[in-house]
Amino acid sequence: MPSDGPEPEVDLGIPGRVGSARRTVVEWGAVVVGALALAFVVRAFLLGTYYIPTPSMEPTLASGDRILVNKLSYRLHDVNRGDLVVFDPPASAEPGADHLIKRVIGLPGETVTAVEGRVLVDGGLLIEPYLAWPEGTDAFGAVPWCDDGGAGSCRVPEGHVFVMGDNRPNSRDSRFFGPVPVDSIVGRAFVRYWPLGGLDRL
């Protein structure tokens, strides 16, 4: 049937489709860049992932476990006894490890000793339910860098903590390299996320 007027123009939509695709690419690029920036901030300032290479923290952590570390903890509160902390190894520690993980036993100003296989803090018995063998802590020798460096005890200097592995017979810790500066602590381990079946709070 003949038309009374000019035929209507048909918009193929090509310019709009190109613009839409360009806009999509820009939006996804912004999302990716933002996600990478957020991941960098989280990794640098909030959370870290670490691998456990040795059995020094058994039975709490086994060789091969992977953990999450809260890097913000000690900007909000002081270090607490019993915390599992990741820290830069002291110069007197054995070379080879980028970081160490141990449990905080003694706080600044406290005196740590071991008698008959048990740990005493300021003369009081430390209850340690996380140990496989509660009487497994040998008496100390001469501990370096203590305020009172006599054999068999260590008074922890200000700004330091005394740390030990849970596997006492197989852990090189403050008994060997002395108290650890608080400002060398990277953060507090709070979750084991690997192996998959071993997800657990620490």
Image (cartoon, rainbow, N blue to C red):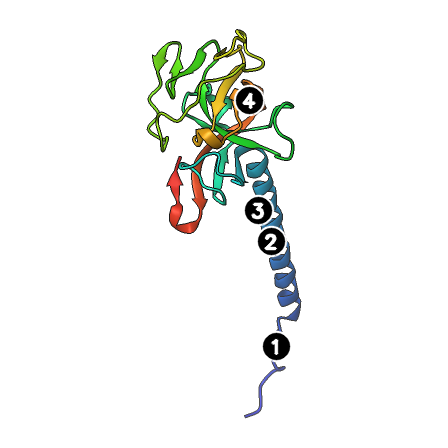
Q: Splitting the image into 4 quarters, where does residue 177 fall?
A: top right
Q: Which mark is in front, 1 or 2?
A: 2
Q: Splitting the image into 4 quarters, where does residue 191 fall?
A: top left
Q: Residues within 10 Å of mark 4 (few under 14, many from 20)?
A: some
The residue type indicated by label 4 comes to Phe
Q: Residues within 10 Å of mark 2 (few under 14, many from 20)?
A: few
Q: Residues within 10 Å of mark 1 (few under 14, many from 20)?
A: few
For marks 1 and 2, the one nearer the N-term is 1
Q: Which mark is residue 10?
A: 1
40 is higher (above) or lower (below) than 20:
above
C-alpha span from label 4 to label 3: 43 Å
C-alpha span from label 2 to label 3: 12 Å
Secondary structure beneath disc 3? helix
Locate residue 17, reporting x and y percent: 62, 67
For marks 4 and 2, the one nearer the N-term is 2
For marks 3 and 1, the one nearer the N-term is 1
C-alpha span from label 1 to label 2: 30 Å
Q: Which residue is mark 4?
A: 176
Locate residue 128, reporting x and y percent: 35, 25
Q: CB atoms at circles 3 and 1 under 8 Å apart?
A: no
Which residue is pictured at 39% across the width and 46% down the height? 198
Q: Which residue is mark 2?
A: 27
C-alpha span from label 4 to label 1: 84 Å
Secondary structure beneath disc 4? helix
The residue type indicated by label 3 comes to Ala
Q: Which residue is mark 3?
A: 35
Please name whichever residue, 78 or 98, is drawn nearer the observer in this view of the structure.
98
Q: Which mark is in front, 2 or 3?
A: 3
